[in-house]
Amino acid sequence: MPLYEHVMIARQDLSNAQAEGLIEHFSTVISDNGGTIVGTEYWGVKTMAYKINKNRKGHYMYLRTDAPSPAIMEMERLARLHDDAMRVLSIKVDAHEDGPTVQMQKRDERSERGDRGDRGDRGDRGDRGDRGDRPRR
């Protein structure tokens, strides 16, 4: 059977349990139509680049499936009809990668370091020598 990867965005006002319940709901839809779920991940609430249905944030979910095309079409149809699901992206892939996705790896690295991870060492704030000579204002 073909291999697929799906990313879903659910409304921001759902609880984490409700968002993970959506993963279970769509997993059963695929299983009932002859497919299998290889893996699922809940990525959490993330800010989107633009508003979708008046929402600035959304719950992101990721599924890896091994399912026939009719099962995927049925899952996407039900996702379009579901009030809580805002977007679904399904991509056919040649092979699933082993291990967690990049999103989950970033989360693990941040929790291990204990910082935001995107800032780096700021050092002494008083030293501004890298800016060159600036005229006084």
Image (tube, grey):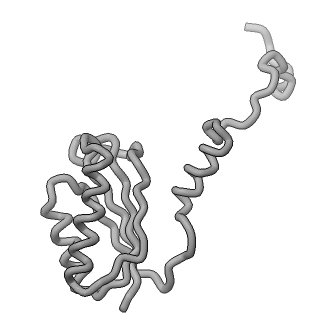
- Name the residue nearer the viewer: 40 or 123: 40
Q: Residue 96 at x, y = what percent?
A: 50, 79
In the rendered image, the vertical position of residue 25 relative to residue 10, given as above or below: below
On screen, residue 18 versus residue 117, left or right, reads left
Quadrant of res 21: bottom left
Quadrant of res 97: bottom right
At x 55%, y 50%, the residue is 107
Q: Residue 68 at x, y = what percent?
A: 29, 88
Quadrant of res 29: bottom left
| Quadrant of the image containing the C terminus | top right
In the rendered image, the vertical position of residue 4 relative to residue 79, given as above or below: below
Outermost residue, bottom side: 1
In the rendered image, the vertical position of residue 121 relative to residue 15, given as above or below: above
Q: Residue 28 at x, y = what percent?
A: 23, 72
- Name the residue nearer the viewer: 83 or 36: 36
On screen, residue 12 versus residue 111, left or right, reads left
Outermost residue, top side: 137
At x 81%, y 16%, the residue is 126
On screen, residue 112 versus residue 90, left or right, reads right
Q: Residue 24 at x, y = what percent?
A: 27, 64
| Quadrant of the image containing the N terminus | bottom left
Q: How many marks?
A: 0
At x 34%, y 72%, the residue is 90
On screen, residue 7 versus residue 12, left or right, reads right
- Name the residue nearer the viewer: 32 or 77: 32
